[in-house]
Image (cartoon, rainbow, N blue to C red):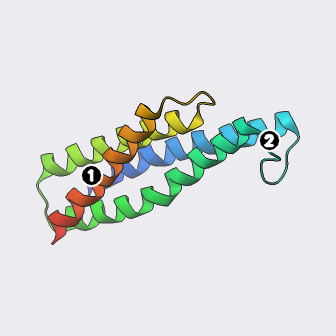
Amino acid sequence: MIHLPITSITASILALFYIFLTLRVIVYRRKTQIGVGSAGDIVLTRRIRAHSNFIEYTPFVLFLLFLSEIQNGHFYFLMCVAVFFTLGRSLHAYGVSQVKENLRFRIAGMMMTFFSLILLSFNLL
């Protein structure tokens, strides 16, 4: 039996965060009566982008994490990368969601995301 605690825990936490980002879009759409697109509403546009950007990167990192863990990657290394990625996605989503954006959150989040991708990629090579 294959036991993948890091991938399982990370995927579960990220899935819950994805639901949170999704609900933020849905609730705001209902509030503003905007069914499709953003109708130029900056708050909705930013919530949509935070949601979309999250789902653009998360599956790929989870797949690399899965491959690393199934190939017996070092537990603490993989755990650190998983925490680092999760924190990076959170910072990025927070930064992108702000109408008066402080780019430090967005930049830090993307750097953490890219660094996680790079670390996992080199780990598998």
Q: Tell me where residue 66 sits by quadrant.
A: bottom left
* Viewer-side residue, 40 vs 72: 40
x 18%, y 69%: residue: 124
Q: Residue at x 21, y 64 (%)?
A: 68
User: Vertically, is 73 above or below 111?
Assistant: below
Q: Is residue 113 left or right of residue 28?
A: left
**Is residue 57 toward the left or the right of residue 120 in the image?**
right
The residue tagged 1 is 115
Asked if residue 113 can be seen in this view, the reply is yes
What is the secondary structure assignment of the residue under circle 1?
helix
Q: Can you say which quadrant of the picture contains the N terminus?
A: bottom left
The x, y position of residue 110, in whole percent, is: 39, 47
Q: Secondary structure at mark 2?
A: helix
| Label ID, residue 29 | 2
Left or right, 68 with reference to 55: left
Query: On screen, 111 above or below 101?
Result: below
**Residues under numbered marks 1 and 2 in contact, where contact means CB atoms less than 8 Å apart:** no
Residue 76's x, y, as percent?
13, 46
Q: In this picture, is 60 found above or below 88?
A: below
Mark 1 and mark 2: Cα distance apart in space: 33 Å
Where is residue 8 shown, x and y percent of the image? Answer: 34, 53
Q: In the picture, residue 40 is in which quadrant?
A: top right
